């Protein structure tokens, strides 16, 4: 990277001098890099290396969305969140989304749409989360991973939106995915003055 | 925690048996805990310990919102994001929001409102991000931290919304904070059929 001409670089770019693995745990991998800052000074960057993940907005025939309640140990409580999971090595994105939906909720979908990507933790992780939209769901029974415990439930879009505003949903990937899917769910984000009666 | 009566527990709860620091780096701290799962089996949980952060939706007199373009080394590119930063030890949340806004953008705000909390990375970090809304901005000049480089810009709410849908904004904390702030910005999330002309 240091050999690229300066004129092609983002003026904010930080350039890698050296990268090394500093922690290789059961679940997390951390790297520590020496970098050159835009002013030529050196600094250190430390970050989690993540394989990427998918999150699925899955619409049931009654228009409600599949949610999960899952215990998230780092915060020592359960969260209301959309079905999601890590991408396995070599796995196609759509295949991962289909697998996670089936394994976690027991549903398969007749129609899939790729919505886009989000980045949950840009300060200290390279994780990306790919957002998928699924409809025409059929229940085929679930098959949770060993040691994975969760409750499956459904919420109408208006109830999910209300849960975001009243703080029952605080998971950023869930809120971000719902934002991106609003038009697909038949909801619009509009200036208040265009809403009749407001 | 093991002594709490079973009847009071979340049936999904994972209970700590042992917790130890496994990585204490320049920026990141990682813990690895042994836990008991709901079925009595043991497992391992690994997670980043984070002091928490704030993110600020700051409205300029023309109705546009302050944004930053900042290089995020883990993903090796710059992101369009709202002003944000880590909470210092012992710092009040509002004081942190005021400090980060001033240091990163050079603005002070005449009015502040606390919006709520989000969790960016519930799978492997205990980070929470507290969302603040700021208006009546006055430019007082900036004072970036040593080694911090960023560009300050502003976007009208409709342009920020468009940037989320076309993928120019993918940072989950920014999208989540904007979702929460929509009513404060005079935007509503409504079923498509209630919008005139749609």
Image (cartoon, coloured by chain):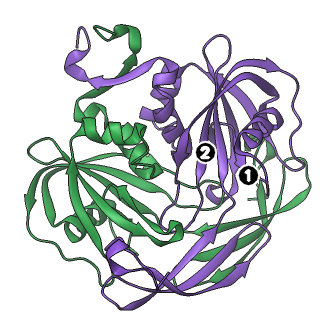
Chain colours: A green, B purple
**Can the viewer see residue A86?**
no
- Residue sitting at x 74%, y 30%: B152
Q: Is residue A76 above or below residue A177?
A: below
- Residue sitting at x 37%, y 84%: B37
Q: Quadrant of residue B79?
A: top right
- Residue sitting at x 19%, y 67%: A102
Residue assigned mark 1:
B87
Q: Quadrant of residue A56?
A: bottom left
User: Whole-Å distance between the Cαs marked 1 and 2?
Assistant: 10 Å
* For marks 1 and 2 on the same chain, the one whose residue lies earlier in the sequence: 1
State which chain disc 2 sits on: B
Residue A21 location (% of width, % of height): 68, 79
Q: Disc 1 vs disc 2: Cβ atoms closer than 8 Å?
A: yes
Q: Is residue A143 left or right of residue A189?
A: left
State which chain disc 1 sits on: B
Q: Is residue B82 above or below residue B37?
A: above
Q: Nearer the viewer, residue B114 or A120?
A: B114
Residue assigned mark 2:
B130
- Residue sitting at x 32%, y 55%: A82
């Amino acid at each position: 990277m240091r050999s690229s001409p300066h004129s092609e670089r983002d003026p904010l770019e930080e350039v890698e001098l050296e990268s090394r693995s500093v922690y290789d745990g059961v679940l997390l991998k951390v790297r520590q890099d020496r970098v050159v800052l835009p002013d030529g000074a050196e600094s250190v960057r430390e970050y989690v290396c993540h394989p990427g993940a998918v999150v699925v907005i899955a619409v049931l025939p009654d228009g409600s969305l599949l949610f999960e309640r899952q215990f998230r140990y780092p915060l020592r409580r359960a969260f209301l969140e959309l079905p999601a999971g890590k991408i396995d090595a070599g796995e196609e994105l759509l295949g991962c989304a289909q697998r996670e939906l089936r394994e976690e909720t027991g549903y398969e979908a007749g129609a899939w749409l790729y919505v886009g990507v989000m980045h949950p933790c840009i300060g200290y992780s390279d994780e990306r989360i790919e957002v998928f939209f699924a409809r025409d769901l059929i229940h085929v029974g679930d098959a949770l991973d060993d040691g994975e415990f969760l409750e499956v439930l459904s919420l109408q879009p208006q109830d999910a939106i209300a849960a975001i505003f009243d703080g029952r949903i605080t998971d950023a990937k869930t809120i971000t995915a719902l934002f991106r899917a609003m038009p697909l769910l038949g909801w619009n984000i509009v200036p208040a003055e265009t809403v009749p009666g407001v």
